[in-house]
Amino acid sequence: MDEDAELSLTVSQLVRRLKGSHLHAEMEREARECLHQPEIRLDTLKDDVRKFLRTSGWERKLQNAVHRELHVGRLSPSLPVAPPEHLKEPLAYMRKAQASWEKRILKSLNSMSTELGVPLARMRPAAEQQDLSNKWNEMSTDEPDLSRFRPVYAPKDFLEVVVALRSPNHDSGENAGARSHWGLIQVPLDVKDITQLRRAYTELSLATGQLGIDDNAHIHPDLFENDYIDIGKKVLAEQDSAAAQQYSRRGCPTGLRADLWALILNSVNQPQDVMRYEQLKAGVLQHDLLVDNLIYKDVKLTASNDDDYFVFEDFLYQVLLCFSRDAAILEHFKHNSATPPKSYIQGKEGDEDYAVFYPPNGVIPFHGFSMYVAPLCFLYNEPSKLYSVFREMYTRYFFRLHSVSSACSGIVSLCLLFERLLQTHLPQLFYHLQQIGAQPLRIAFKWMIRAFSGYLCTDQLLFLWDRILGYDSLEPVAVLAAAIFAFRAENLMEVTSLASAEAVLADLSTLKVMPLIQIFLFAS
């Protein structure tokens, strides 16, 4: 397809998507109202309306909306005639593996429902609805018996699925390169080498000023920080999503981060967003879902036991319970290799006329899922705003960390990138760990599937997520994982078992993210 035809298709897709949006309706209403203003003349009507929309800020809002559509993977101009499943995932063996994994998850959930005698969904009695409404802001004080419930799966279960992937067209026999057998990932995906990473992440070079490098609240900010913060304020004043994303590549100042992230994600939290959140809350009050117990249990096992996040327990319940009811999340499955699970009402198993997505958002939480939300609680203290930002973070990035796909920011590619970086730059360490049965990926996978949430101290985690947003990629997660092994290489060369290797890497709370990434990429 030539460039003109591709551009034309992209524009038509954008117009089609934006035409039914709330933004389009607001712009249309604003344009109609401006017709009553005296400066709008009939002979120059089109130009006058455009000028009005530009000067009143609507042009910037439209640019931000276009920027968002281009970055969430919804537009696929290069494959206009491909079947929908190919747009979701082009490789057949990946689609097959993901489908098989989904069947296992759904079977586990249905088995739990049957064994415990707990329905997948039920209407709450009026008294129970009122009781939940009364304690909505203090759900952490409730102590339900969750001992019978177990997570549907844990990261180590998903790792085995990723490790088992094999391409039918790839020679993994004796004639294949020896180095490919060192690691656990044996699929031929295209991942960046160190030279390509340096070119892609030039703003992280040692010669470039960064936030997250030896900055301390007790030290007076140097000239770079003062100037950098001033630039950040100007970016926010302009309300330009693309500029905010570029700015985030060098880190976001603490006082500006919440607004910058919301701008990058185009999460405006307008009255209709608040109304939508209240509707989701009403859905939680009206219906009890089996997955609610999985959410409660996950928060209790993870965030509630974390020194940084336990104070946000109520926020986590509120956001995750509403998230499970949000049918708008189903939209992201158009560019996700996964398929939302279905259940059948009235016992009509297999009859599509009685099929419903379960849970309503199509996402079954796993052990650690709540940690995608927990760090955001430091930035947003308004539930509807917190929810809006988390929803955008999930549908743009986090879903890729727990689904099988060939996407460059998918968990399979991140695992392969991690192993390649270690094999290439620390071959002795990789070989040593492999020989003692301590494959590096078995240690690092739990970090990567949660984007390091719960493993790094919060300020360092937010510096990492700044770069994820700035570069619109999860690759920094894999680079950091490799950098941590490089940093602890001397100690790891002395270990003799998987348990001792895990002990060396058990505490990451003192690590400084940006120095590690910089040194690994540009000084190794």
Image (tube, rainbow, N blue to C red):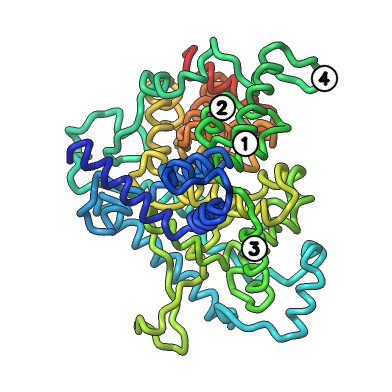
Q: Which residue in the structure is indicated by mark 2? A: 247
Q: Which residue in the structure is indicated by mark 4? A: 218
Q: Residue 520 appears at what percent x and percent y?
A: 50, 19
Q: Residue at x 42, y 52 (%)?
A: 403
Q: Residue 439 appears at what percent x and percent y?
A: 45, 36
Q: Which residue in the structure is indicated by mark 1? A: 260
Badge 4: residue crowd in 10 Å (few <14, some 14–19, many ≥20): few
- Which amino acid lies under the numbered mark 1 shown in the image of this protein? Leu
Residues under numbered marks 1 and 2 in contact, where contact means CB atoms less than 8 Å apart: yes
Give the spatial CA distance, label 4 vs label 2.
Answer: 24 Å
Q: Which residue in the structure is indicated by mark 3? A: 277
Out of 438 and 180, give the one closest to the viewer: 180
Give the label, 4 or 2, closer to the camera. Answer: 2
In the image, is residue 369 above or below residue 506? Answer: below
Badge 3: residue crowd in 10 Å (few <14, some 14–19, many ≥20): many
Badge 2: residue crowd in 10 Å (few <14, some 14–19, many ≥20): many
